Image: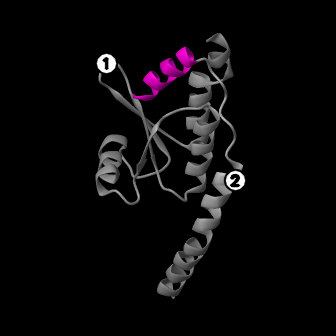
Amino acid sequence: MRILIRTFFRGLRLVLAPVMLISEKLSTPRAIERSPEAQARVDAACRDLALYQFRTCPFCIRVRKEIARLGLNIELRDAQRDPEHRRELAEGGGRVKVPCLKIAHADGANEWLYESDDINAWLHRRFGEAEAQAA
């Protein structure tokens, strides 16, 4: 019975994955506009960030949409298909759970932020409209 259930859900994922990815492409918002200087500062700040994610995870899609809306160039690391990224996530963050934003601080410490709502709130506080208008 377990194999039947597992097979059903794998088949369901195979059918839904392309639908989810197409839906993401069609519904991704436009990026906020910044001056070239402000965008360069944001790009520099994003070099210290990496998002560990699965391509078809709905929570990861939510975070990727926020990244696109904020016009951020954050490295996306596929923890599902890349064993090295999966290992880094398990060792650094303590568990293989996505989405997870790795924040490298200037002192060399790394912060691992889980939960799509928490990641989006952090990104919005750090790079949101107030930052764009200040530039």
Q: Is residue 130 left or right of residue 94?
A: right
Residue 41 drawn in magenta:
yes
Identify residue for label 1.
Answer: 107
Graded by Cα atoms within 10 Å as few (under 14), some (14 to 19) or many (20 or more), the crowding at tag 2 reads few
Where is residue 76, by image quadrant?
top left
Residue kind at label 2, given as amino acid type: Leu
Rendered location of residue 22, percent (x, y) = 64, 60
Q: Is residue 129 left or right of residue 76?
A: right
Where is residue 57, by image quadrant?
bottom right
Along the line of sight, the residue nearer the viewer: 22 or 9 = 22
Up the image or down, 8 lies above or below 135; here it is below
Rendered location of residue 110, percent (x, y) = 35, 30
Along the line of sight, the residue nearer the viewer: 78 or 9 = 78
Boundaries of the magenta span: 36-47
Q: Is residue 35 left or right of residue 101?
A: right
Q: Element under label 2?
A: helix
